[in-house]
Image: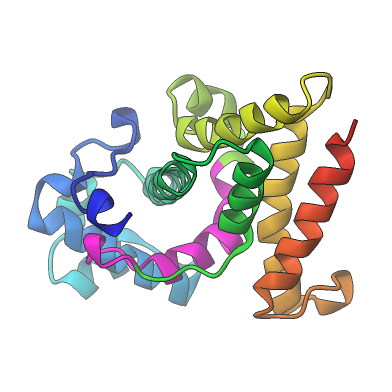
């Protein structure tokens, strides 16, 4: 899988950015350091001015790549979902059993992330923390409908649709595959967040990915059983 992924460029929808950050060293520095700063400061406190100071460039340079920190956040989250999708595709490509493929999908959603050195400028471990803490802010906005028309959330929707198709393969009569998969995707992150910060809201212990995987697997397969 690692060798295959090394030959793949993960792309994000063009309308999310003004200039592809993967097209230059400066753009990759923007991505690398924005992940570090958003994780350290949180999205509300993060600014392009602080990012420019960290990189040693100007705010104007960053604005050539992204219109706002909102579109930068959308880019990071979209990259994450595309990366998970590639992991899912290569992990399930030669497995005929739909049940096994669905279990793998749940494991990928709920499992511990390790850094993928094929994308050295992106720290996937830190990026997952951003997705857990900040991803809802990408679409819980007044501009969500306009952003959706621009394709800002296509990566997330495509990833969910891929898993939804497996659910329908297992039980074509199940009425709510899209609702189930999006609920599980969001629940995976909420349960991780709760285990770290609001433990009384979950039975998942912080750092116990196997517990989260067990919970989500139980939830999904009981929901879709015939």
Residue 16, image quadrant: top left
Identify the magenta region: 116-138
> Is residue 51 shown left or right of residue 43?
left
- Which of the two residues, 195 or 146, is positioned nearer the viewer here? 195
Which residue is found at the position 18% from the left and 57% from the top? 28
Q: Residue 179 lies in what quarter of the image?
A: top right
Quarter that holds the N terminus: bottom left
In the rendered image, which quarter contains the C terminus? Answer: top right
On the image, the x and y values in percent for residue 195 come to: 74, 75
Task: Give the vertical position of 158 relative to 134 (above or below).
Answer: above
Query: Can see residue 44?
Result: no
Residue 148, percent across and down?
52, 25
- 134 horizontally vs 196: left or right: left
Residue 147, can we see it?
A: yes
Where is residue 56 drawn, in percent x and y?
13, 71
Question: In the image, is residue 134 part of the stretch drawn in magenta?
Answer: yes
Residue at 42% over, 71% down: 114
Q: Is residue 148 left or right of residue 61?
A: right
The answer to whether residue 58 is above or below residue 9 is below
Determine which quarter of the picture holds residue 188: bottom right
Q: Residue at x 76, y 80 (%)?
A: 205
Establish if 177 lies above or below 31: above
Q: Give the residue at x 89% y 44%.
A: 222
């Amino acid at each position: 899988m690692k060798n295959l992924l090394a030959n793949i460029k993960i792309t994000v929808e063009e309308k999310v950015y003004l200039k592809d950050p993967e097209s230059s060293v400066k753009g990759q520095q923007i991505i690398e350091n924005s992940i570090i700063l958003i994780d350290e400061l949180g999205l509300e406190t993060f600014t392009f001015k602080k990012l420019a100071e960290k990189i040693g460039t100007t705010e104007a340079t960053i604005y050539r790549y992204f219109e706002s920190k909102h579109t930068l956040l959308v880019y990071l989250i979209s990259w994450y979902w595309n990366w998970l999708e590639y992991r899912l595709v290569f992990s399930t490509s030669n497995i005929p059993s739909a049940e096994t493929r669905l279990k793998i999908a749940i494991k990928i959603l709920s499992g511990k992330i390790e850094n993928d050195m094929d994308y050295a400028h992106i720290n996937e471990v830190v990026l997952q923390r951003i997705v857990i803490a900040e991803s809802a802010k990408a679409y819980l906005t007044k501009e969500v409908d306009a952003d959706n028309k621009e394709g800002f959330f296509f990566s997330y929707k495509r990833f969910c649709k891929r898993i939804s198709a497996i659910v329908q393969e297992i039980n074509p009569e199940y009425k709510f595959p899209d609702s189930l998969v999006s609920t599980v995707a969001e629940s995976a992150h909420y349960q991780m967040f709760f285990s770290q910060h609001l433990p009384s809201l979950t039975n998942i212990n912080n750092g116990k990915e196997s517990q989260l995987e067990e919970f989500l697997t139980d939830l999904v397969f009981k929901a879709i059983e015939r």
